[in-house]
Image: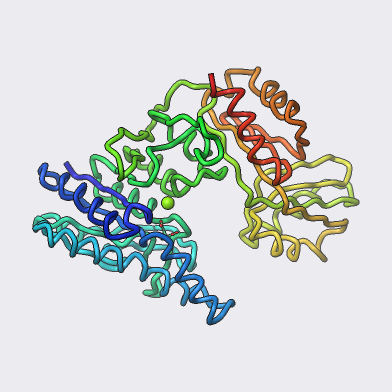
Amino acid sequence: MLIVQKYGGSSVADKAAVQNAASRIAESFREGNKVVVVISAQGNTTDELLKYASDMNPEASERELDMILSTGEQLSAALMAITLNAMNIPAISLNAWQLGIVTTENYGNAKIEAVCSERIKEELEKGNVVIAAGFQGINKNGDITTLGRGGSDTTAVALAAALEADKCEIYTDVDGVFTADPRVVKDAVKLKSISYEEMLDYTTMGAKVLHNRSVELAKRYNVPLTVRSSFSKNEGTSVCAEGGHRVVSGIASDKNTALISITEMDNIPGAANGVFSLLAKKGISVDIILCSGTGEISFTVAKRDMKAAVETIKGSVKGKIETNDRLSKVSVIGAGLETNPGVVSSLLEAIYEENINIEMITTSEIKISLLIDKNDGERAVRAIHNKFIKR
Ligand code: ASP
Ligand code: MG
């Protein structure tokens, strides 16, 4: 079998963790598998590197930041290779250009466009375990790029797709994908399996367990994905085409949302198009949109895009602009939402019972999102969990 394994930052945080991960890798290798391992930077290394950089220059260029950030994964990959070597396992670490990971041009949040996997295949043929530095690629300028925070998951899935791996295992410090963040909801339940679609909505709406783009890729290339703990032998969660048959699979919350409202607009056809085409040109994604038809439009963007969004529409759009970045977007995800019409009303009941005020609601086939005050976020997640999942 060809197996791609990914070890996250906490799974290689210190000497004991590295050795623990190394013995799991060794075990897979000794079973006769070809093994490609994607490694994250150790522990909080990426945050520390960012701090280092901003101490020198808070306005550091994205290009130079990527040069710095990619070293975290380079270090941990080589460290893993030499740890395996010490255990008599042949292993070689490879960086972005050696892995042949080609990305879009943009620094800091580049997308993988292609994987030229010849070198990896050569090394596997030679009998090596390949240790890949996660989170990085090379763009058409020949520069190092990074894939956005948490991007090593995406490296793993991209390599699994390119190599047509039999399995892609994501090792982390929790036992799998839970119905809610176990730090917020004590009795959150581990899922045995979840569909690609549900997982995609779950990560897009704030679940941190997997990098959003990794799920997108897994879905597109049908990569069999498992999320499990590197510190236990528990089974983990499989992310696959067919999930379980639940009404609600997960409840996510995201504090990274800002609401922009434009009032007193001219109520004419094309007013909304004017706003959103300007934002699209700037590459700013919009999530929830509410158009009242009375000269009022509200929409949400990622918090980091709020300033740029306001700058973009100010001056070009007639109306009064207001912003609110003290919000939490709570989302309920489940393949059964569409076929269970009572869910929205039970959800609203749960929120009402907690006396929480809702700013906006949107629904799709497998998702309901509520925009509420940031301070009510965790309480709302717990209340919804109680209603739908706790028995
Ligand atoms: N080291 C990077 C981060 O902390 C990438 C990753 O761990 O997936 O975001
Ligand atoms: Mg991660």
Q: Is residue 241 above or below residue 3?
A: above
Residue at x 22% of width, y 45% of height: 3
In the rendered image, residue 154, in percent from the top left (x then y), is placed at: 39, 52
- Tally of numbered discs: 0
Q: Is residue 68 above or below residue 267?
A: below
Q: Is residue 145 left or right of residue 255?
A: left
Q: Quadrant of residue 111?
A: bottom left
Q: Nearer the viewer, residue 250 or 168?
A: 250
Q: Nearer the viewer, residue 193 or 390?
A: 390
Q: Nearer the viewer, residue 317 or 94?
A: 94
Q: Is residue 205 left or right of residue 230?
A: right
Q: Is residue 69 left or right of residue 364?
A: left
In the rendered image, residue 100, in percent from the top left (x then y), is placed at: 29, 63
In the rendered image, residue 375, in percent from the top left (x then y), is placed at: 70, 45
Residue at x 77% of width, y 61% of height: 313
Q: Extreme bottom residue here?
A: 56
Q: Quadrant of residue 368?
A: top right
Residue at x 17% of width, y 55% of height: 129
In the rendered image, residue 51, in percent from the top left (x then y), is placed at: 51, 72
Q: Is residue 254 left or right of residue 276?
A: left
Residue at x 74% of width, y 38% of height: 360
Q: Quadrant of residue 144?
A: bottom left
Image coloring type:
rainbow
Q: Nearer the viewer, residue 339 or 88?
A: 88
Q: Is residue 175 above or below residue 280?
A: above
Q: Quadrant of the N terminus?
A: top left
